[in-house]
Amino acid sequence: MWHLLSLSKPNSKEDKKLVTAIKTIAGITPGNLALYKLATLHSSRGKEKNGFRESNERLEYLGDAILGAAVADYLFKKYPFKDEGFLTEIRSRIVNRESLNNLAKKMGIAAIVQFDQKNIQLQKVILGNTLEALVGAIYLDKGYLRTKKFVIDKLIQPYFDLEVVVSSNSNHKSKLIEWTQRESKEIRFDVEEIKKGRNQREFAAQVFIADQPFGQGFGLTKKKAEQDAAEKTCIMLQI
């Protein structure tokens, strides 16, 4: 689909604002502006053409893979004596859904994403998805090496203290369950599926302690959604 988008120059106030935002966020000047327009377009605002709804979902799919590869490349070189399990875990802590949502918010992605603002659920998950789509757009526009530089210079180094990432305990669900056992409180995780697109799905998990709602989390699997919800609950309870 991307190759059908014609090369475009900023010809409106909105286009110029997008170019300025991309320069600020990514440190690059868009070559094919249409790619970046598509990267910021959620399916809730997309128009259907020939049975296909325009949205950033395909770019999100591509960007997810490119982002994972760039982070893996960076960690592989930074930790030459660490095993595969360690590298996989640290990469997961950097590119998980909650981490990407927080990162996208700090970077100002909210200012450029186009979506149905009446949908409150979307607001909780859409920023990280848009960041992945932006990575996909940069990859198609500038190539892998420039995209990897963006990931390292604009995502990892400014926003992640890797010593803190490495030392943090990522199994928040186990930590939370142990706490509720010590406090003699009942805990449950309610999980439901959220439809993201025609071929994608995401899960939402809600933590209840003694039937009182606490953290709500999201993830591409039930396990990740539960971990996300548990992490937020641990923060709320200062565990």
Image (spheres, rainbow, N blue to C red):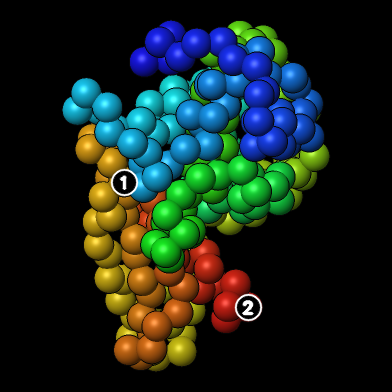
Expressed as whole percent of the image width and height from the top left, the position of residue 148 reads 66, 18
Give, as a three-letter code, the residue at label 1: Lys
Task: Identify whether 58 is placed above or below 174.
Answer: above
Is there CB contact under 8 Å for labels 1 and 2?
A: no
Q: Residue at x 54, y 30 (%)?
A: 37
Name the quarter where the N terminus is drawn.
top left
The count of marks equals: 2
Q: Is residue 205 left or right of residue 239?
A: left
Q: Residue at x 53, y 21 (%)?
A: 35
Q: Is residue 34 left or right of residue 181?
A: right
Out of 84 and 145, give the one closest to the viewer.
145
Expressed as whole percent of the image width and height from the top left, the position of residue 78 reads 73, 23
Q: Residue at x 59, y 15 (%)?
A: 8
Residue furthest left as drawn: 51
Q: Residues within 10 Å of mark 1 (few under 14, many from 20)?
A: some
Out of 225 and 75, give the one closest to the viewer.
225
Q: Choose mark 1 or mark 2, whichever is in front.
A: 1
* Secondary element at image label 2: loop
In which quadrant of the rendered view does residue 100 lie?
top right
Could you say which disc has been placed on residue 1 in the image?
Answer: none
Out of 91 and 49, give the one closest to the viewer.
49
Expressed as whole percent of the image width and height from the top left, the position of residue 86 reads 56, 34
Q: Residue at x 50, y 11 (%)?
A: 6
Residue with the mark numbered 1: 196
Q: Residues within 10 Å of mark 2 (few under 14, many from 20)?
A: few
Give, as a three-letter code, the residue at label 2: Gln
* Secondary element at image label 1: loop
Task: Identify whether 152 is placed above or below 119.
Answer: above
Residue with the mark numbered 2: 238
